[in-house]
Amino acid sequence: MAESQVNEVALKYVTDDKADEQTNRYKAYPEYKDSGVEWLGDIPSGWDAQKLKFLCTYNDEVLPESTSKDKELIYVDIGSVSATEGITNTETITYENSPSRARRIVRDGDVILSTVRTYLEAIAPINNPPENMVVSTGFAVIRPTELLYKGFASYSLRFKGFIGEVVSRSVGVSYPAINSSDLVNIKIVTPSVDEQIKIANFLDHETAKIDTLIEKQQRLIELLTEKRQAVISHAVTKGLNPDVPMKDSGVEWLGEVPAHWEVSKLSFKLKLLSGDGITSNDIEATGEYPVLGGNGLRGYTNRYNCDGDYVLIGRQGALCGNINLGHGKFFATEHAVVVYPHEKFDIVFLSEFLRFMDLGQYSVSAAQPGISVDRINSLKIAVPPYQEQVEIGKHLKNLIETFEKLSNKAKQQIQLLSERRTALISAAVTGKIDVRDWVKPE
């Protein structure tokens, strides 16, 4: 999100009553001055813009070479950190078996910022860490002095404007990096320490509320996914009529199915054939015929090898068992298995039944797992009469559309809340809103 967009959202957050019922609590400071820093703009007249190095120390402690080989470390690598989620993962390892970069010691109140691949925004505050926690030497460990309150530092160094400045000063194309000494030359704005504490407390409270709303939306998406799968699984194995007589399918994972459905070996009903090879030189961003692989659309080409409605099964790596649909004239690559029915099938019913079967579990172990067509061919499937397949397919199509609408709405809410969170932090740490009179609600 561009800085100008963040500021626009910040202003909306501050001024638009519809965005939040309590935004009218936030007002601007009575007087501003030029910060002297282009990307910071105007700041409250009582604030300063100072280089970070005058407000902190950095990279103060590393593990000594004399560290016992058996010493247990809790290690944080760059891939386990994000500006929005903090530290998401740690690794417990002995000093002897640790990578050579696992050396920087962190303390409570530090902020770690990645100095390599800075576009990843691997930045996180350190709160009450275990004594044996260390982070990668790819981080700059910022330790605030008495001039910089730790809570204020944690927000200021994750502020989008600051991150943007770190990225813009990084050197290199494929692996952009910045020296720690250059990083601490970047300026941040600093009110008095008392005001820093007030701002940090305000942001702790307000961002926690937003995070709770985000968690609820994420949980809603999880519940929708679970419900969607349960409804689809029931429809493709039990049908739509709850009163129909049932029979034992004779297949443990399938259980009972309607008595009038046929239970058959998959190879008797379907033929599974690999797609054809195609090079990346033959695939274009636009073209006449879609190119479909194990994960759906890959691009376009000037020829096709399928014409009609088909189910495609991903056949390699993490895409083993992945289900996609192809319609009309398209080119199926060797990374997909094309399903050719021996008899008439409803494409929606068939695709959802195959998805229910979780075909990825029938892969052959190798350096890169591949789908085992022989194993799949030997499986049993339940086949309702064609007209019933059509009815189930229509029912599922409507249900899937409904679930996707609800899920997309929740994702949009998460995006909106995340932007609001970013905007609020931006507004508070740069003095766009005055929270000096804020009092934490009971």
Image: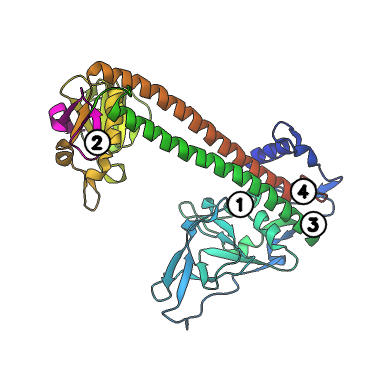
Mark 3: which amino acid? Glu
- Does the residue at mark 1 contact the one at mark 4 (Cβ under 8 Å)? no
**Who comes first in sequence, dot 1 or dot 4?**
1
Residue 156 percent location from the top left of the image: 68, 55
**In whole angstroms, how far apart are the C-alphas of marks 2 and 4?**
63 Å
Q: In this picture, which residue range is highlighted in magenta?
A: 247-275
Q: Tell me the CA gap for discs 4 and 3.
A: 11 Å
Q: Quadrant of residue 241?
A: top left
Q: Secondary structure at mark 2?
A: loop
Precedes in sequence: disc 3 or disc 1 = 1
Q: Residue at x 53, y 70 (%)?
A: 104
Residue that carries the numbered disc 2 in the rendered image:
255
- What residue sits 33% from the left and 31% below the top? 234
Seen from the viewer's position, the closer of residues 401 and 192 is 401
User: Which mark is in front, 1 or 4?
Assistant: 4
Q: Nearer the viewer, mark 2 or mark 4?
A: 2
Left or right, residue 84 beside residue 313: right
- N-terminal of the pair, mark 2 or mark 4, is 2
Q: Position of residue 161 (x, y in %)?
A: 65, 49
Q: Residue furthest bottom?
A: 66
Residue 420 percent location from the top left of the image: 65, 40
Query: Residue 163 got which mark?
Result: 1
Amino acid type shown at disc 4: Gly
Q: Which residue is mark 3?
A: 195
